[in-house]
């Protein structure tokens, strides 16, 4: 599976990349802003986005997620220290799109299970369409 990491904190992104590579995933790159994420999705065509739900930038995480799902139809795993912030996302984002939440700090095992869950959830939803 090809994964793009969308995380604005370099150390966290590097730790994620190392863990994902150790699990055998192909990490295509690290995007550090919403615009960079879109550019890299277009260029690299990942299978899944691992995204910081609290990322700073020119667009919010929910706007970015909505765009990713409308244009690219990709599953998203949200990483956050503040899971209650997902309550601020529009209901459409939370109900209509195949996303999975992973709380920071995370264990490598939880990271692996969450990635697999998100991809399987996405695959099943695409099958139903």
Image: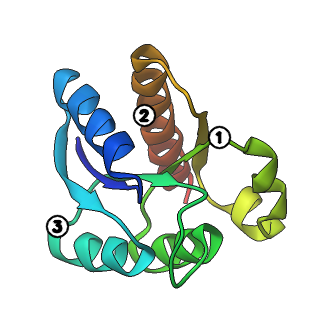
**Residue 56, x across and y down, in percent:** 54, 70
**Residue 45, x across and y down, in percent:** 21, 65
What residue did someone put label 1 on? 81
Between circles 1 and 3, the one closer to the viewer is 1
What residue did someone put label 3 on? 44
57 on left or right of 88: left
In the image, which disc is placed on residue 50? none
What residue did someone put label 2 on? 115
Residue situated in front as seen by the camera: 18 or 124 = 18
The residue at 32%/36% (across/down) is 16
The residue at 44%/67% (across/down) is 73
Whole-number angstrom distance, CA of label 1 to CA of label 2:
17 Å
Whole-number angstrom distance, CA of label 2 to CA of label 3:
19 Å
Q: Report the quarter where the N terminus lies.
A: top left
Is the image coloured rainbow, by chain, by secondary structure, or in one colour?
rainbow
Q: Regarding mark 2 in the picture, which secondary structure is present there?
A: helix
């Amino acid at each position: 599976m090809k994964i793009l990491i969308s995380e604005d904190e370099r150390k966290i992104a590097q730790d994620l990349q190392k863990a994902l590579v150790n699990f055998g995933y192909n990490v295509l790159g690290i995007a550090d802003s919403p615009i960079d994420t879109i550019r890299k999705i277009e260029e690299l065509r990942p299978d899944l986005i691992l995204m910081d739900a609290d990322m700073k930038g020119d667009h919010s995480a929910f706007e970015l997620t909505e765009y990713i799902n409308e244009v690219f139809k990709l599953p998203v795993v949200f990483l956050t220290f503040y899971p209650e912030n997902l309550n601020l996302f529009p209901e459409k984002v939370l109900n209509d799109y195949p996303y999975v939440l992973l709380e920071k700090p995370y264990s490598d095992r939880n990271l692996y299970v969450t990635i697999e869950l998100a991809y399987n959830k996405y695959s099943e939803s695409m099958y139903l369409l």
